[in-house]
Amino acid sequence: MNALPETGLLRLKQALQFISVSRTTFLTGIKSGRFNITPIKNGRCVFYRAEDIRALIQQMSSGVA
């Protein structure tokens, strides 16, 4: 597995490599506001900031999310 970059954009499949939730749980968490991540949409492509994924990992490890 590759390391999570400090900055940049990740596709959904790349982001899910670093967090231990399913695709459905991740997307539902974003839609409900449980995960404080704003997707970046460019046409049909959706990206997530590496900084947001890193913050989510921190929240999950501290038991907040």
Image: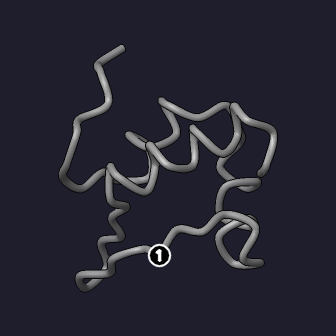
Q: Is residue 64 above or below residue 35?
A: above
In the rendered structure, the answer to whether residue 63 lies left or right of residue 50 reads right
Name the residue furthest left: 8
Front residue of 54/29: it is 54
Q: How many marks?
A: 1
Task: Specify the quadrant that holds the N terminus.
Answer: top left
Q: Secondary structure at mark 1?
A: loop
Horizontally, is 27 left or right of 6 in the view? right
Q: Which residue is mark 1?
A: 38
Pinpoint residue 19: horizontal percent, then vertical percent: 58, 35
Q: Position of residue 27 (x, y in %)?
A: 65, 64
The residue sitting at the top extreme is 1
Q: Which colour scheme appears in the figure?
A: one colour
- Tell me the crowding category of disc 1: few under 14, some 14 to 19, or many 20 or more residues within 10 angstroms, Cα based: few
| Residue found at x 23% / y 35% | 5
Where's residue 21, x and y in %?
71, 39
On the image, the x and y values in percent for residue 10 come to: 30, 51
Is 12 displayed left or right of 29 in the figure?
Answer: left
Up the image or down, 40 lies above or below 58; here it is below
x 30%, y 71%: residue? 45
Please state which amino acid type lies under the numbered disc 1.
Answer: Thr
**At 52% from the left edge and 39% from the top edge, which residue is drawn?**
16
Q: Check the image and name the residue furthest to the bottom.
A: 43
* Residue occupying image coordinates x 76% and y 54%: 25
